[in-house]
Image: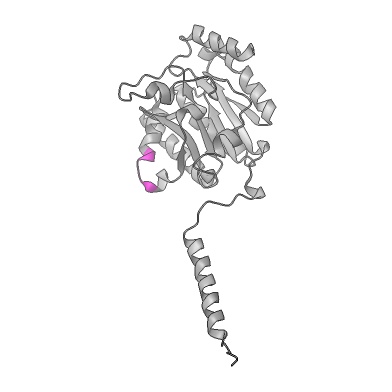
Amino acid sequence: MILRWNITPLISVLCGFTFLSFLLLDAYPTEPVQTKSMQLRPEDIAIVLAWDQKMEEYWVPRTLKDKQEYARRHGYDLLLKNTTDDGRAVSWSKIINLRQAMLEHPDKLWFWWLDMDTLIMEPQFSIEEHVLEHASQHQYIEKDIVMSWDCFGLNTGSMFMRNSDWSLKFLEDLLTLSWHDPIMYGEQRKMQDLFHTGQEGVDHFDFIPLRKACAAHDHKCDLDSQAEFQYNYHKGDFLIHFANCAPDNCHSELDRYHSMLYSR
C-alpha cells in the first residue's frame, strides 16, 4: 500500500516557523554584523590637540613630535587647536575644540582628543584596531563616546568621540554648563553630571580600561587597592599620561620616558 502524504500543512508549518525565526532574530540580535561600509579607515579619524603657553617651554618640544609621527604613520589628520582664553580654565579647551573640529570636518567619523602631557609609547597600535574595534565587541558603531574611568570618575585625558548629532549636542550642553564650573577639570565634573542624568545618555558611552588608551604615570587612589595595576603605566601600554604634572612638575620623569621612546 502506498501512503500518500498531504505536504501542504507541513510546508505551511515550516514556512511559519522560518518566518517566526526571522522575527526572533530581528528582535533579539546577537552581535552587529561588520560590513565593509562600516570599517573605519585612517582618513575617517582625526587627532585633536591643544596647549597653552605654559606648556610650550618644556612639554610641547618633547610631546608633540610623537603625535606628529604617529599621525603620519597611520594616515590620520592631526588638528592643532588653540586653548581657551575667555575666562574658562585651559581644560575646557578640549570641549571647545572637539566641537569646532566636528563642525569644520564633517567628513571625519571619529575624533581622538589627547592631552599634550602624554607620550605614545607603542606607536604601532592603530586607533581603529587597538581601541575602537575592541570596544564592547564591535559595539563602537552604535556608541558616541569611548573613554575610560578611574576612581575619581570619568577620565578626559584621552577620549574618542564619534562625529554625530548626539555628540555635537552633548558638547554644546557641556559648554552651556561651563560657566557654572569654569575652573580646572570643570569639564570632567560637568561631563559626569550629564552622564548621570539618565539612561539615555549612559547608552551613548562605551568604557575601556584606563591602560588601554590613557595609562597614568602615577595614579594615586586610596579607595582602590588595585589602582597601581589598573591605572598606572606598564611596559607595552599604548601611551603614558603624566596627569597633574604639567607644566612645572615631572620633568625628569618625562625625559626618562622620552629617552626610552626614542632610543629603540
Can residue 88 be seen in this snapshot? no
Q: Position of residue 102 (x, y in %)?
A: 57, 38
Report the span colored magenta.
Answer: 194-199
Quarter of the rendering containing residue 224: top left
Q: Position of residue 120 (x, y in %)?
A: 57, 22
The residue closer to the viewer here, 125 or 65, is 125
Q: Position of residue 106 (x, y in %)?
A: 62, 41
> What residue sits 67% from the left and 37% below the top?
43
Give the answer, above or below, for where 33 lies relative to 197: below
Q: Residue furthest bottom?
A: 1
Q: Residue furthest left?
A: 223
The residue closer to the viewer here, 245 or 82, is 245
Quarter placement of the C terminus = top right
Quarter of the rendering containing residue 62: top right
Q: How is the image coloured?
A: one colour
Q: Is residue 68 magenta?
A: no
Give the answer, above or below, for where 23 lies relative to 103: below
Quarter placement of the N terminus = bottom right
Can residue 214 be seen in this snapshot? yes
> What residue sits 52% from the left and 11% below the top?
254
> What residue sits 46% from the left and 24% below the top?
91
Quarter of the rendering containing residue 79: top right
> What residue sits 64% from the left and 28% below the top?
78
- Tally of numbered discs: 0
Q: Position of residue 35 (x, y in %)?
A: 64, 50
